[in-house]
Image (tube, helix red, strand yellow):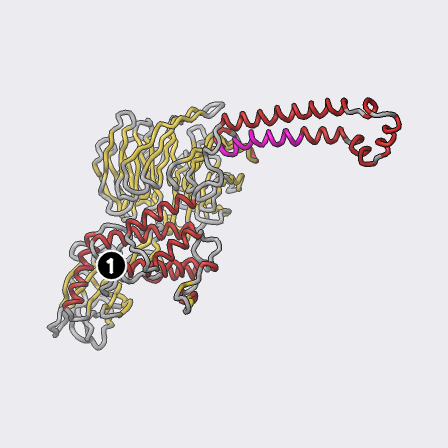
Amino acid sequence: MSYCINPNCSYPENHNNLLYCTACGSKLLIEGQYQAVKKISDDLGIATYEVEVKGEETLEILKVLNINSQEFISQFQQQAKVLAEINHPGVPRVKPGGYFTFLPRNSNQELHCLVIEKIPGENLQTWLGKNNLPLDQELALEWLTQLIEILDLLHKKQFFYQNIQPSNIILRPNGQLTLTNFSLELQSAESDFVALGYTFIYLLTGQLPSTFLNSDTNTLNWRNQVPNVSPKLADFIDDLISDKQPKNTQILLQRLANLKDNLSQPLIPKKSYPIQRKLFLGTGILLLGLAATQIFSYFQQKLNPERIFPENQQRQIQDDKLEKFFSQNSGKFLVGGIILILAIGGSHFVGYFRIHPKHLKLSLPNGVSLEATLNTDSERVYSVVISQDGQVLACGNGDGTIQVWHLEIGEELEIEELGIIEGHTNDVVAIAISKDGNILASGSYDGTIKIWHLETETELTLQSHFMRVTSIAITPDGEKLVSGSSDDSIKIWHLPTGKMLHTFRGHSDSIYGINISPDGKILVTGSHNNIKTWNLETGIEISTLVGHQGRILSVSFSPDGNKIASGSSDKTIKIWQLETGKILQTLSGHSNEVNSVIISPDNQTLVSGSKDHTIKIWHLETGKLLRTIKGHSRWVNSVAFSPNGEILASGSFDKSIKLWKLG
């Protein structure tokens, strides 16, 4: 079906492949490249269409202003200008030439048109209905931060969104929120904040804010509906809808950052008791306990009735039932006292290790032991990697930093922090280390890739993606780097010089996972619902693997290069035969998205990390679940093996990396 965009057309629906409307004669191929295939809405003087773009597979959105008012035309032009200037996934992208005018047949009124990006995903109202439960506090903080960051970009250009509501906020498959359906109403920043507050009351309670209106006090009594929401977060939302204090995006973002820090504080402070205090206190209590038992024993002998009382009084005392009870059970009281004292003293020793878990090896069932917990300054660890020589451990963090440690893997695991690398302006979500361990590469939501030469401490920035960089990998020979992005493209770079060599296109959605075969010849990429394999040298697509019902968040080659493992937002893991594309196993067991998969160096097991906070170990050949490791308190985003397969590293949104020894 092809639609005529002439607002006065008597019958705008036309068959495909026509160049002119059969009813009014207006052009159907607008600007020589856009053809409206679906009418989405016609509201407040703006008609919205889904359009096909000539020569492209993707769909775009066309907005047509049907009001001949200079005021509205000026606002429409400002909207187009602002959207074109902002390069951020939180607002729809406008390509060059996306704003134009169109003159229908036999009309003297030009239509002002704007073509914007069609955002993949679902709006938050649909999301809430599908999940059938209100938003949790953790996700509410993340979404509030995203939306206020978007408003910050708009408000800096003196542009106000005016239309915040769940149906106008799209959740992209990669978790990014995007504002759509921009309004032409002239209001203020304050109205954006009020609408944002009302939106989050709805998302947290699942009910319209008007449900909680107390007409006597003119307040919304919604807090008792969300007992699991922190009062500080509830205060923040109430402040959004209040007119009692001035607000701006920077102040709100700072308050959110403080709020996140407060809500993520551990129950036991990391450094509440230094080791000396704990050891001295425990030792002191033990010595006091031993001394008390000696004193008790001494007085028991000294106060023997036979020695200090006359014979008639002795009989009187011996007849006393209470004294007889204590006399007969004095040994039990003595032992009980010793146990109590030892328990109190011992608890102080154990308490130290509870507070400092990295000093304690925790043995778990089935031969798994927690060797170390490394706490980061960032609240989110996205990616972990161990170098091929097993001596470098690195992680990419949500505060834009990379932390690096030196490892000595032997009978005892020795760890030394080397430092923190700064340079990115947004979350570092992907890292890779060259085989020789000299180069560390990082990909960030700031849209850049950075190459860090660890020996010379020099830095090279690669920039060609126009949206978030989501995944990276380095070829075994250290000559090429591959990057995937939310802009749906894959780019190949010459690692020593940073020169971009090729761009691969074939996915219609974000690239979430990338891996390179052990021989360096084949690239595998994961996107929405499908996996593709490519000839890395020529860029020719080899195959498309279909089987998952969701985003493929992680892909990994087996060490022999014959199999591919994939983890998905559909909560499953699939193992594929590379040569045939056949699914060999589907592994089910996680209760939430599978964020990371990796196959062990000995080609025997597969390890998966999930949003359900667990790590699972599977037999690669049979698909049998061997072990479930519980230790993280939030999402496990990344897992990595040491080259000998003895140490497994896991990174989580609980601010930590854990190192596990597999028996």
Q: Please indicate, yes or no, whether residue 57 appears anywhere in the rendered image.
A: no
From the top left corner, tell me how far across and down residue 280 is, in percent: 54, 25
Q: Position of residue 396 (x, y in %)?
A: 35, 37
Residue 341 forms part of the magenta stretch? yes
Q: Amino acid at mark 1?
A: Phe
439 is within the stretch colored magenta = no
Q: Quadrant of residue 48?
A: bottom left
Q: Give the residue displayed 26% in from the left and 41% down from the top.
A: 448
Q: Which residues are magenta?
A: 339-357
Query: Label 1: how many residues lie within 10 Å, few (<14), some (14-19) or many (20+)?
Result: many
In which quadrant of the rendered view does residue 208 lie?
Answer: bottom left
**Which residue in the structure is indicated by mark 1?**
160
Residue at 57% of width from left, 35% of height from top? 365
State whether residue 129 appears in this view.
yes
Residue most extreme to the left: 108
Taking the image as shown, residue 635 lies to the left or right of residue 252, namely: right
Q: Quadrant of the N terminus?
A: bottom left
Q: Main secondary structure of the magenta part?
A: helix
| Picture coordinates of residue 428, whole percent (x, y) | 32, 40
